Amino acid sequence: MVGPDIAIIVPVAATINACKSPSTRTIQPPYDSFMDSLIEPSTRAGLEPDTISIANVNLSLGSGAARVHILKDVSLRIAPGEAVGLIGPSGSGKSTLLMVMAGLERPDSGEVVVNGIAFNALDEDGLARFRGRHVGIVFQSFHLIPTMTALENVAVPLELAGRTDATERARQELEGVGLGARLHHYPSQLSGGEQQRVALARAMAPDPAILVADEPTGNLDEATGNQIVDLLFAKHRERGMTLVLVTHDNALAQRCDRVVRLRSGHIDGPATGRHWIETAAR
Ligand code: ADP
Ligand code: MG
């Protein structure tokens, strides 16, 4: 839902009508249709709102003859706290869909609403602020800054977001992923598994509502990958955050509450999960 740090300015119909005589004044609720448009249909029906709602999204990338229609009329709803495994052949659009959910790619058409906020209504700065507060991202190749220690890699984004307790928070997160003894190591001094733990700590440090992970075990051996995945699911359960996990590994995807399959830019199968069917039946 709308967080306390996001202000929405709403035109109040009542103030426009205030100067009219009492006999002609129409009483309108202050947030009429504008507010209504911000609320998910599920909320209006008395259901829990989606954490992620993607409706009829199309996205093409590249230009000229190299232009590729990647996401084709994709709709997907993910409930709060749900863990979704996103699978599909290489090139089917998994990473692109993840980037759309994270607000890193803007679709050509369609709507993306995350945590109650419509991305279409945000400019680039607004989208970046939203991401910083509400979305944690873990990549296959870690994406750590090589000139910063583990502690700095986690603390600096928090500092940039204005957190005064950035270093202490970063230390806690790194201890929480078992790296309390590696705080001052640089990425080159850490193993792949340790680097991914740092990336996970960095993603979780702002306590995001959603965590998206793109093949987080792709660069790791099986045993190390399994440890990372165990940690990911442990954090998901502990924090109750919504998790979207892109993976090639069917067994790994099956550990999620729901598996969504992409095929050539289309969702293959239902766009809502067990949770929705159960909630709607209550
Ligand atoms: P997946 O993660 O499922 O392997 P991607 O989302 O990375 O798939 O890519 C889907 C398709 O879009 C692929 O065919 C890929 O080549 C193409 N693609 C990805 N990024 C670009 C880009 N910037 N320009 C053109 N085509 C792209
Ligand atoms: Mg990919």
Image (spheres, grey):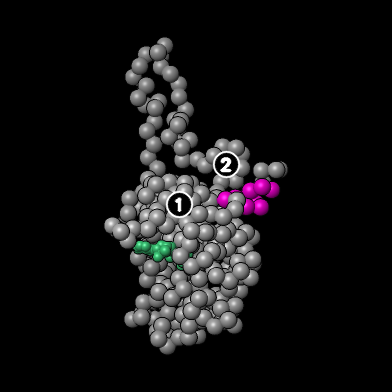
- Residue at the outermost top position: 23
Q: Residue furthest left?
A: 64
> Quadrant location of ligand 1?
bottom left
Within 10 angstroms of label 1, few (less than 14), some, or many (20 or more) residues? some
Mark 1: secondary structure: strand
Q: Nearer the viewer, residue 67 or 50?
A: 67
Quarter of the image with the C terminus is top right
For the residue marked with disc 1, what is the amino acid? Lys
Residue assigned mark 2: 42
SS for dot 2: helix
- Mark 2 CB within 8 Å of ligand 1: no
Per the rendering, the mark at residue 215 is none
Residue nearest the observer in this picture, 229 or 240: 229
Q: Residue at x 45, y 21 (%)?
A: 27
Q: In the shown orientation, is residue 257 left or right of residue 28?
A: right
Judged by its main secondary structure, the magenta piece is helix
Q: Label 2 amino acid?
A: Ser
Residue 80 in view:
no
Query: Does the magenta portion include 114?
Result: no
Q: What span is colored magenta in the figure?
A: 271-278
Measured as percent of width and height from the top left, residue 163 is found at 40, 64
On screen, residue 166 above or below 281: below
Between the C-alphas of marks 2 and 1, the distance is 24 Å
Disc 1 CB within 8 Å of nearest ligand 1 atom: no
Q: Which residue is mark 1?
A: 72
Q: Nearer the viewer, mark 2 or mark 1?
A: 1
Whether residue 266 is visible here, answered yes or no, is yes
Counting from the top left corner in percent of width and height, residue 214 is at: 48, 68
